[in-house]
Structures are given as C-alpha cells and as structure tokens.
Amino acid sequence: MRQSPDQQLEALPPEAPPALTPEDSARSRDRARVERARVEGSHRSLLWLLIGPGILAMLGENDGPSMISYASDGASYGLGFFLPFILVMFAMAYVCQEMSMRIGAVTHRGYGELVLQRYGRVWGWFGAGDLALTNLVTLISEFVAIRVGLAYFHLGAPVAVVLGLALVVLTMSGGKYWRWERIVLGLALFNGLFLAAALFVHPSAGSIGKAFATWSPFPGGGFNTLLLLVASTIGATVTPWMIFFQQSASADKGMTPRDIKQGRLDTAIGGVLAAVFGCAALVTAAKLSTHNGTAIQGLAGAGFPAALRHISGGTVGTLFALGLIEAGAVAILTISASTAYAAGECLGVSHSFNSTPRESAVFYAANFGTALIAGAVILIPGAPLLSIALNANVLATVLLPVSLVFMVMLANDHQLMGRWANKRSTNVIGIAVIAFVGLCGAAYGIDSFLQTIHVVGG
Amino acid sequence: MRETDTPPAGPGVAYGPHDEEELIEFLERDQLVADRSRPVSPARLGPTAVAALWALRVFVVVVSAMVIYTFIAQLN
C-alpha cells in the first residue's frame, strides 16, 4: 500500500542534531549575550551588542577616496550645493544598507551566495567580478590615502603599504567576528578627526546654514568636472562593497529578524556619523577654494594636508593627514573583508571571522591577497593619485546599479524574506535610487568618453 | 548561559551532547553552518526579467569601458 507523504515523513527516524562547528560555537556565544540582554530588558546593552555592521559599512565608506572627493568638492566649489547633496546621498545609502542588513538578518546568508544560488551562476559571478574590480581599484585608493597622509609626516609609500597590510593581519587573527568588529569599530571612530579639522578652520555658520537651506551657490565651471564630482560623490556614499559587506557581516554576526530594529539604528547611527564627518571634510577643504586649488597639486593633486597647513595652519593639516590615514586604514579592513566574504560565498567554502585561518583558508587568503595586490600598485613611482581616487568612486557608481537591482529583487523575494520583504514605499525609493545612480554614472561616462574622442568639446 | 559554561572553541574540540544542546539553543536552526551550507532553491525569472537584467548588464559594461578608456587616455 502506498503511504501518503505525511505518513512517509512520520516513518522517517527523527533527524539527528547537526554537528556543531567552532564557527557555530563562537556565534552562539555572541548570541547568548544578546539573548541575556534581551531577557534583562537592557536596551543599551542590546544596542551595544548589535551595533557594528551598519556603522562599519557607513564609516568604512568614509574612506580615503571619499574624503578626497568631499575635499575636492569643497576646494573646487566652496560651501554650497555639495553640502546638502552629501546628506541626501547618505539618506540614500541608509535605504540601501537597511535592505542589505535586513536580508542578512532574515536569510543568514551573504549577498554573493544568495544571488548565485537564487539567480544562477552567471549573475552571481558577474556580481563577484564587479565587486573584485571595484574593490581592487578602491583598495589602491585607500593605500593612496594613507600614502598622502603619511607624506605629510615625511613618510613614504613603503610605510603606507606595511601599515595597511599589518593592520589586515593583526585584526583578522583570533578567529572571532566580535573581536574583529570591535577593533575596526574603535579605529573607525577616528573618522571624527575630520570634524575636529573643520572646527579648527572656524567655518562661517551662516554660510553652512545657507548652503543647507538653499543648496546654493550651485557649482559653476565645466560641466564634465561637475559630473565627475557628482558621480564620485555618489560613489563616495553608496558602493557595491557596502552591500556585500553589511549583508555578510550581519549574517556572520548572527543577527536574526528580532534584531532588525537595532540593525536599523546601527545603520542610521553610521549614516549620521558618516554624513557629519564627510561634510566636515568638505567644510575644511572649502578654505582652499579661495586659493584656486593651486596648493593641492602636490602628490599628483592629492596634497590636501600640506595645502591646508599652508592656508589654515599646522593643526588643521595634521588632523586632516591623520584623518586620511584612518580613513584609508579602516576601509582597507572593511573592503578586504567584503572581498573575502564574496570569494568564500561564490566558491562555496567557509567564510567567517568566527573561524580560524586554517578552517577558512580561502576567506583569509582573499582578505590579505587583495590588500597585498593593491598595496603593491602604489609603490609605482609617479602614479596619478588624485585621478585614481576620483575614478575609483566613479567606477563604483557605474557598476552599482546591477548590485542594487539584485538587492531589491532579494528584498522582494517573499519566499526568502517572508513578512520582512520590502514594502511598496521602500521599493519606490529603491528604484528611484537605482535610476538616479545609473543616470549620473552614465552621464559622466558618456560625456567624458565623447570628449576624449573629440566628439564634443570640453 | 555564562561564557565560562561553554567549551573552548577550536578545531578538533569534542563537544558533549549536553554542551551542544546548550550552544545550539541560542542559534536559529538555519544559522548553523550545516544548514547554511545547503543552497537555497533557485528562483524562476521570467523572460522579461532576464532580458532587462541582460540589458542592464550590457549598459553597465559599456559605460564602465568608457570610464576606463577615458581614465587611461587622461593618463597619456
């Protein structure tokens, strides 16, 4: 007699509990602390335990090329359009990163593996390829930022490379996500050096207020330069690595749907801090706008700290230089981590800071390897540092729409997300963000190309 | 659960059944490595969605090539 499916299930022996790996054990310990805080009703402890991926993604994106982009905005156009524009960009980043966190918390899987498994290998590998390309170029820019910062203290490129690589090695030892996250969070707070620098230049509160209120003065000058700065400013706030990173880190941290409220707060805190520090970099460099930017030509155009020392004094120059070193260092850690997560996810091997280098060899090798390759590039004499930094952000902007489209598709996948799938309002904003980013990236790419081949005038 | 109650993590550590039960209770079933290593089922994309994704992919590759070409030309 044929059995019904239910009868067949009943006839099966009870499922054996799964084998517990050291990675499970480490994650479970972190979750035990979260559950204890939740039972005790300690909201502050709960938030302290659950913050991390959002702040790291946002402050990690206040990286070397981003701060140089903001400073270029300020040095080129002064206080005006770009100040409120940065705020709007971070609001846009919040929408994207909240989705990323939510998908990670609900599915417990990274972006790379979900795209690969859900939509096929072609799309998964395309996404990983985009990420590898933008991450490599961006990592080069991070070493550039450290190089620019260290040059202020008369230290050369080899020191920048050794410092960056040493940080990667030091932070990833230990086999604990929690430890890695807290070290990087501690470093990321020094992004506040840009705020200190801005306070020291004594900016006009009236001019800042006017800029936020009126979005003016609107930048004049060359259309293509404006497009470059708009595209690079977008790329300075939302990039593919942030999406990969926050989703994978949320899963690695062990976040669950019950933690989404704190995850949103974490992302919002990160967004606010990053926006304030980003605006501070612009305000600081705006002092250079009255000097036609001639002083920033050192180090192939990225010599902001030396220029600021010349115009605003040694303290401002030193703070800005230290800020650039911090921005580059933190981003090297987070961007290398996002590359490592993507490599592990796409190859289907262990990918967690909760495992040791022996257990996750590919993950740790990708983490260190990408940083090593990027570091080697800045040792090339005469490399155009400012151009690399700005173009890294532009490339990220151009490649971003594909990552965003798949993220919105995942966030709308009711089979995966259940009741945590996107609401209609989130989709409307998400689609508007994709259209805006795609349009700005394409406008700069096409206009620059046509100028380069002399089809249109500059 | 106190941290000292949990066994030390590391390769080759043997967990007793009771320890495993205590540790597992703080994780959702699909958070375990064993469960996460099982792939999710593939989604069915309609022909319109596939065509739109390919169009976006081609667009992005073309614009990226323009940006990279411009960057290299500016270096020269």
Image (cartoon, grey):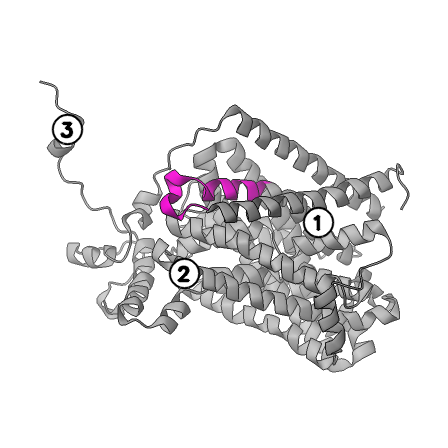
Compared to A292, does A448 lie above or below?
Answer: above
For marks 3 and 1, the one nearer the N-term is 3
Residue marked by disc 3:
A8
C-alpha gap between disc 3 and disc 1: 57 Å
Give the prevailing secondary structure in the magenta stretch.
Answer: helix
Would residue A372 be found to the left or right of residue A175 on screen? right
Read off the magenta span: A402-422
Are circles 3 and 1 on residues that touch, CB within 8 Å? no
- The quarter of the picture where residue B4 lies is bottom left
User: Where's residue A397, x and y in %?
Assistant: 66, 48
Q: Is residue B9 magenta?
A: no
Residue type at the position of mark 2? Lys
**Labels 2 and 3: the sequence-earlier one:** 3
Amino acid on which disc 3 is placed = Gln
| Mark 2 secondary-structure assignment | helix
**Secondary structure state at the residue bearing disc 1:** helix
Res. A261 mark? 2
Height in image: A190 above or below A405? Answer: below
Dot 1: within a 10 Å radius of its alpha carbon, few (fewer than 14), some, or many (20 or more) residues?
many
